Amino acid sequence: MKNELGKETKKPKAKTITVVKVEMKAAEPEKVNCEDLKKNLDVKNLKVVKMKTKSVLSWDKNTNASSYNVYKKDASGTGMVLVQNVTDSKLDINITGDQVVYEDFAVKAVLKNDVCDIEGNQSDMTKVQTGPKEVMMIILLSLFIGAIPFFARRRKY
């Protein structure tokens, strides 16, 4: 007798071997309730680390999520605008422009597979600096230094 791997087994004194065909029933497909899975799609511990040229928004990884949608409060302040969908639990946000700007960001975990395409609950809003603070400080410092000679001359008279 040989198995699938080609291993041969010999049984002396064996007279007859009876092979019985067994009907295998396929397992019933498991019904998945996407709404139940949505309860496990929370984003927690949203935090911001500010660097010179960018702010890094990060959060705890959710093992049930296939990706994350990062939202920003729109200019009118009434709704949220999708910024980007990321698969990692962080997003680099470049600091641009010439004014100090803080914007509100929030994250939602996403589960997208063959059965479900759902978004979890929105995280708490977090303020992220998207405009440079250093430029404003340099401008103010320049104005102050430029004003010193002006005020020094006024005191002589």
Image (cartoon, rainbow, N blue to C red):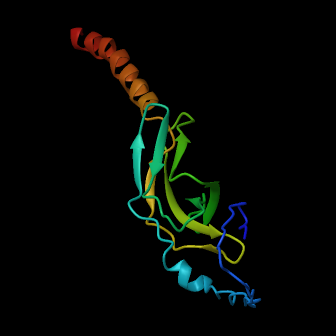
- Viewer-nearest residue: 72 or 18: 18
Taking the image as shown, residue 43 lies to the left or right of residue 32, namely left
Inspect this view and state whether residue 67 appears.
yes
Measured from the top left, where is residue 122 in percent x and y? 51, 70
| Residue 47 % position (x, y) | 39, 53
Residue at the image point whose x is 55% and y is 73% from the top: 120
Point out the residue furthest to the front here. 13
Image quadrant holding the N terminus, namely: bottom right
Residue 9, given in percent of the width and then of the height, sits at 66, 67
- Rendered image quadrant of residue 140: top left
Q: Residue at x 44, y 54 (%)?
A: 127
Please identify the quadrant where the C terminus is shown.
top left
Residue located 56% across and 64% down the image:
77
> Which residue appears at 55% of the width and 79% of the height?
37
Residue sitting nearer the eye, 27 or 44: 27
Could you tell whether 29 is left or right of 125 in the image?
right
Q: Height in image: 36 above or below 77?
A: below
Q: Vertically, is 141 above or below 36?
A: above
Q: Quadrant of residue 76 in the image?
A: bottom right
